[in-house]
Amino acid sequence: MTKKDSGFNRRQFLAVSGAGALAASGLWRPSFAAEMATIRQGYQTNMWGMPTYYLMRSGELEKRGIKFEEFAVPSGNLTMQQMVARQVDLGTYAGPSFIIGNSRGGLVAIAVIENVGRTAKVVARKDLGITKVEQLRGKKIANQTGSSIGNIFVNLLAPSHGLKPGDYQEVRMNVNDMVAALAAKTVDAMVNVEPYNAIAEADGIGNEIASLEGADKVPVFMAATPEFVEQHPDTIVEYLKAWLAVGKTFKDDPSKPADVIYEFFGSKGYKMSKDTFKKALSAIDVNPGFPSNLVPYMQGHAEVLMKAKRIKAAPDWNKALRPEFMKKAMA
């Protein structure tokens, strides 16, 4: 074939070959990058939200042409409320908050990002000498009411130790305020997550008396508004590819995200030794995917929430759980 027959002139050839070289070098992005939607990403500033925080600092979203705006809140149930109000597109929280979000705003799950049962604990004031949950009868317990861990404590863990609502005084409080309340002795115990539990123990303020993992491994979902999923399915798939890359980093090079997350908490005024921080972070199992056995687990939580009159009916799991995007991302 001659140059004339090929349909290429010298300028076109150089443009195409140059693009190929740039693509090989990783400096050029394919045209789909310009088509990716901007994501309004919600996350909580406790340890549960730190994998999402690292995702936004890792460069993996930018590699896929995805722009984002970040919305930080103390706990995931607040992200859920933002999503119900359509102020945020994506965010992480555990099963109970997701079920409530589906009931109130049709939110859907596109992945399970991590398991965090070992990060959620009941911590009592050290000076009280409390060693068992049942000893909290009549005590003041700080709890972020409406959060997933709050629901798990009230509906599952406390009853398993013979405590029902009314047997203790629930003090509504954000998780990031609880250590100070414990130190000031305005509460006797707290239901909290990392790194706040590790800080309380390291500072001699409190001691762990139970882990929520005994009642629930607490998978954390990445949820999305139904409108965003339906309007931007390609962005969702590329977004989840970024998550798979981040999950690999947590597994193969954990010091990389650890340094970024440690710096985050330091910037917020939290004073933690590296050892205290590593203990807190090690309680998170970051493994993005979509387990096939979620429905029985989620149905159990839905029944608890129905009994507590938090929701009227269980979600339609075929609509609420959307594994097809993760399957495409993993293909």
Image: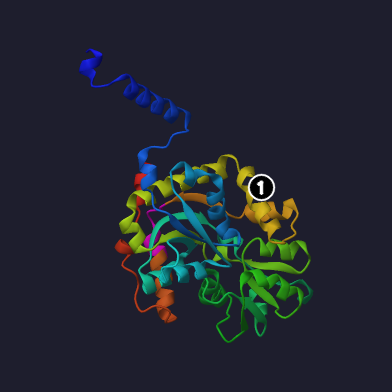
Tally of numbered discs = 1
Query: Is 199 positioned to the left or the right of 170 in the image?
Result: right
Q: Position of residue 295 (x, y in %)?
A: 37, 62
Q: How crowded is mark 1: few (under 14 residues within 10 Å), some or many (20 or more)?
A: few
Horizontally, residue 90 falls left or right of residue 179, namely left
Task: Give the vertical position of 294 relative to 313 (above or below).
Answer: above
Q: What residue type is labelled 1?
A: Asp
Where does label 1 land, which residue?
Answer: 259
| Residue 214 drawn above or below residue 277 | below
Q: 258 left or right of 88?
A: right
Quarter of the image where one finds residue 90: bottom left
- Provide the residue span drawn in magenta: 290-297
Residue 121 visible in the displayed image: yes
Q: Which colour scheme is used?
A: rainbow
Residue 166 in picture, x, y percent from top left = 58, 87
Q: Does the magenta stretch include residue 257?
A: no
Q: What element carries label 1?
A: helix
**Vertically, is 145 above or below 62?**
below
Camera-nearest residue between 307 and 184: 184
Which x, y percent locates residue 151?
A: 51, 74
Determine if residue 129 is in view: no
Q: Quadrant of residue 6?
A: top left
Instruction: Out of 33 and 177, give the one closest to the viewer.
Output: 33
Q: Which of 162 and 158 is in front in this view?
A: 158
Whole-percent x and y of residue 101?
A: 41, 70
State which quarter of the image contains the N terminus.
Answer: top left
Residue 254 picture quarter = top right
Q: In which quarter of the image is the C terminus?
A: top left
Whether residue 293 appears in magenta in the rendering, the answer is yes
